[in-house]
Structures are given as structure tokens and as C-alpha cells.
Amino acid sequence: MKLGRRNDLDAVSFHLVMGVLALACIVILIAPTLVVLIVSFTSGFSLKFPPPGYSLRWYAALLDSWQLHFAAMNSFKIALWTTAISIVLGVAAALGIARSKTMTAKVLDSLFMSPLVLPALAFGLSALMLFSVVGLPVSPLTLVIGHTIVCVPYVIRTSVAALSQLDPVLLESSASLGASRLYSFRRITLPLIRPGILAGGFIAFMSSFDNVPVSLFLRDARTDMLPIRMWQDLEGKLDVTIAAVSGVLIVFTVAMMILMERIAGLSRRLR
Amino acid sequence: MAATPTTQNLPTVTAYELKLAWPLGAFFIVFFLAPLVLLFIVSLYTDTTMTHFGLTQYAKFLLDPFSLKVLGATLWLGVEVTALCLLLGFPLAYVYLRVPGWAQSVLILIVLLPLLTSVVVRTFAWIVILGRQGIINTALLELGLIDSPLRLLYTEGGVIVALAQVQMPLMVLPLITALTRIDPNLADASAALGAGAWRTFWKVTLPLTLPGVIAGCLLTYAAALSAFITQTLVGGGQMLFMPMYLYQQASTLNNWPFAAAISFIFLVAVFAVITVFNMLGKISQGYANA
């Protein structure tokens, strides 16, 4: 009896601690997003929370802000190009290294993954040095090159994971039935790894759209980027317009996330 | 020549040639490795006009208490953020595996949301929460617990909490993967043998998830060190960490050799930490499989 009660207390305290910490974690994860959404509808001029009243005025102000439109358009174009190049180069590289057990494949894999852990700001500075040594002025081209380096790892990771789940028997039977390698790739490999490619491409797009450390060095006034514009606006003054921009970005992100979860099983591919 | 390709090609229908990786390999050599080599060369110039070679920049950094303090503060910040992420993230991953399917779908979206939302937006949210008129100060004032707003923004505590939220998904996702792999029978066996919940956790669950813990810590730590936006916006001007130090020297002061040396020291420090983590990972994998 006594032992049983001690075990109960033990189990209750364990689950209580785990539950409370997990709840705290959930609050920390959600609260910021909710707070920004609520503040973006404020009728006042400050970021006071709770807002004194609600209105759509800051969203209306957004329509007139050509600087933000310009920066958002730039970011969108660069992210699109970065994603396209990342998918082409990244999927090819994933096919090459996924089933190879050679040392070269291992070295290449670590090389391709290293931008994920090394400080991106140091890479941004070194890329700027390279471009200035070879005499290439900063332009959308240099931005796309820099972004591709830091975004392609996501495409490789999800594509390699998708390829490792592909049953080789399928390719063997396809080949034994006389299909060429290209035909097997088009009709078997590609459809089966497509969700992995989509998920990786989506993350690459979002991380290019959101990139600051690389853009900081590789852009100029003509290629102003949205996150940098927002960051500089926030450093100067706490502008409520930024809350409205954030609101738009949050809604866009959530919608895209739910879409990608439906068509590509996003959450399963990120683990 | 004619006969060998068929015998060699037959088993390779299931594999693709390694040469498919070379376009990206070449891209990385030209635009990733070459810049890093160049960075190292620039760091070896003694003057900003870049005419003489020497180790002056490294001596300048390593003998300067201010620079060393910035490096130390940055590495320590990473430790604090990683510890907080682990403390809160592990219970979340643990709970994730014990809730019904619909709740799992909701939880995973909650974890993924910060990963995909713009860093500037997430950081901005913390400015609203921690500011003088922010949600915490308003609540505490109304409850009568404080008389004047607390200074929460521009403090190290603020930076740590904000960074923990920004990097939390990087910790939770590998932990969920690691916890999924544990045989549930092991916990039952431990309980049947008389071990309590805490003992089972410390002796069975945690050791078996060590590879996931280390993978999560590595990603969180590396990301926290270079989180430029969150560090500058929530930290404000008083707190200086390596990324901003590097940026100031390169951009505002145009001192490329010193900025390059800072970058290189930063890269080496991060690389050293990653190597240690990877070694721990290998050891823990042996431990978890034993």
C-alpha cells in the first residue's frame, strides 16, 4: 500500500512537471504570433497591448507604402529564382548522393549541409569579398547565388529522405520490363519523391524570402529586401505599419503551411 | 569495352551516378569554399588598405579583452538558449507522443509555425510583448505587482527567451523523431520492475533519446549564435554579440581585414563546438544502441 502511494506521487509529480513545461512551451510558441496579429488591428499609434481600439487603418496605410511594396516584390522574385535553382541543382545532387556509400558522397553531403550550421553573416561577408575581387557588382544575380548556397540544403535534406524511402524493387522491375533509366525516373522516381521535393522547395522559398544575413552584404538600394526594410524600420522607430506587414506575412505563412501539409505532408518531411 | 557496360549497368538501375552531384559540387566550390578561402586571405592583411601580410588582426582580436568578451558572451548566449530550449522542448516532444492523432497534427503545426514565419516578425512580436507598454508590463501594473514598467526589452533575459522561441522547432523536431524510435515496451518493462516515473525517465527514456537531444542541441546552438536579427532588435545597442561586431567592422567601419578575422575566429569557434557535439553524438549513439 505504502509503496503504491509513493509510486502514485512519483507518477503524478512527473506528469505534472512534464505537462506544465510542455504547456509553457506551447504558450511561448504561439503567444508572439497571436500578439502581433492582435496589435496589427490597433486603432492607436503605438504598440500598446491590449490595443485601445480596433481598426484596419494600418492595413490601409500598407497600401500606400511603395517602399514596402518594392522590397516585397524584390524579395519575392529573388526567392522564386533561388527556389528554382535550388530544386534543379539540389534534386540532382540528392539523386547522386542518396544511394552512394562512397567517401566522396559523404564529403559532398557534409559540404552541402554546412551552410545550415555555419554563421550565415560570415558567409555573406566572404561572398561579397569574392564578388568584389572578380569585379561583379552586387545585383539580383549575386543575391540569388548567395541565397542558393544557404537554401539548397533544405531541398537536399527532404529529397534524400524521400529517396531513401523509395523501394529499389520498383526501379528493378521497371528496368526489367524494358523501361529506359530516364523513363523510370520520370514515371517512378519523380512522382514518388515529388512531395519531398515540394516540401524542401517550400522551406527553401520561405528561408530565402526571410533571409537577412546574406542579403545584408549582397544587396544595394536597387535591390532592397523586405526583411531588411522591416528590420531597419524597427531599429529606427517602432512603426505600427510593420505590425500590419507582419499580419499579412503570418496569414500568408499559415495558409501556405496548411496547403503544403495537405499536398506534401510537410510535417512528416521535416523530422 | 562493349561487354563490360552491360554487366556493370545491371545492378545500377536502382542507383543514380554520383556525377549528378557535381553541378552543385562545383557551385559550392566556386561560391562557398572559394569565398571562405578568400575570407581567410583577407584576414591576413595587416592594414585596411590591404598591402601587407601578417597576423596583426588575430593578435588584435585575441589580445583585446573587449573582443574576447564579445566572443565569450556569444558562446555563452548559445548555451543559455540551448538549455532553455531543451528544458521546455523535451516535455513538449514527450507530450506529443502521448496525445491523440488530431492533437498531434495541431501540435506539429504549432511547432512548425515559428520555423516558417519570418524571423523579423517573430522578433517584432517579442518587442511588443516585452516593451514598456507591452503585455507583461501592462498585466503586472494592473495586478498592482509593480509601480512602474520593468525594463524587459534590451536585457539578456529578453534575448534568451526570444531566441528560445525562434529556435525551439530545431530542438523539438529531432526530439520527436528520437522519442518515436523508442520501443514503448521498455518503459513498461521498467515500470513492471518497480521503477517510478522519474526513475524510468532518467534511466530509460533520456539515455535512449540522447542522439536526438544532441542533434537538437547542435542545431539550436548554431542557430542561436548567428541569430543576428533577434540579437540586435531584442538586445538593443548595449549588448554586442559576434554577428553585429562583425557587421559593424565590415559595413560601418569598412575594416575588411579585421571583419574577416572576426568572421574566421567565429567560424572556427562554431566549427569546434559542432565537432564536439558530433563526437558526443557518436558516443551517445553507441550508448543508445547498446
Image: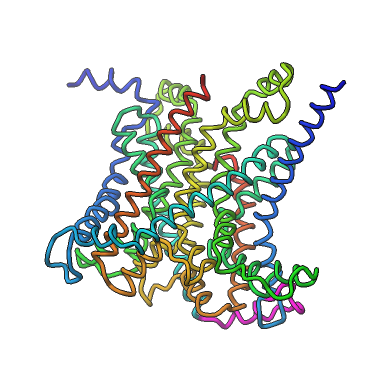
Which segment did they paint magenta? A48-66
In the image, farthest residue toward the left: B52
At x 12%, y 67%, the residue is: B51
Q: Is A233 left or right of B36, judged from the image as shown?
A: right
At x 68%, y 71%, the residue is: B134
Instruction: Determine if the magenta segment contains residue A53.
Output: yes
Residue B14 to residue A201: above or below: above
Q: Is A229 left or right of A218, judged from the image as shown?
A: right
User: In this figure, which colouring scheme has been used for the structure?
Assistant: rainbow
Quick one: B165 or B266, which is closer to the camera?
B266
Q: Position of residue B212 (x, y in %)?
A: 53, 35
Q: Position of residue B16 (x, y in %)?
A: 35, 32
Q: Position of residue B235 (x, y in %)?
A: 51, 66
At x 65%, y 54%, the residue is: A29
Q: Is A174 left or right of A97, judged from the image as shown?
A: right
Residue A214 to residue B87: above or below: below
In the image, farthest residue toward the right: A1
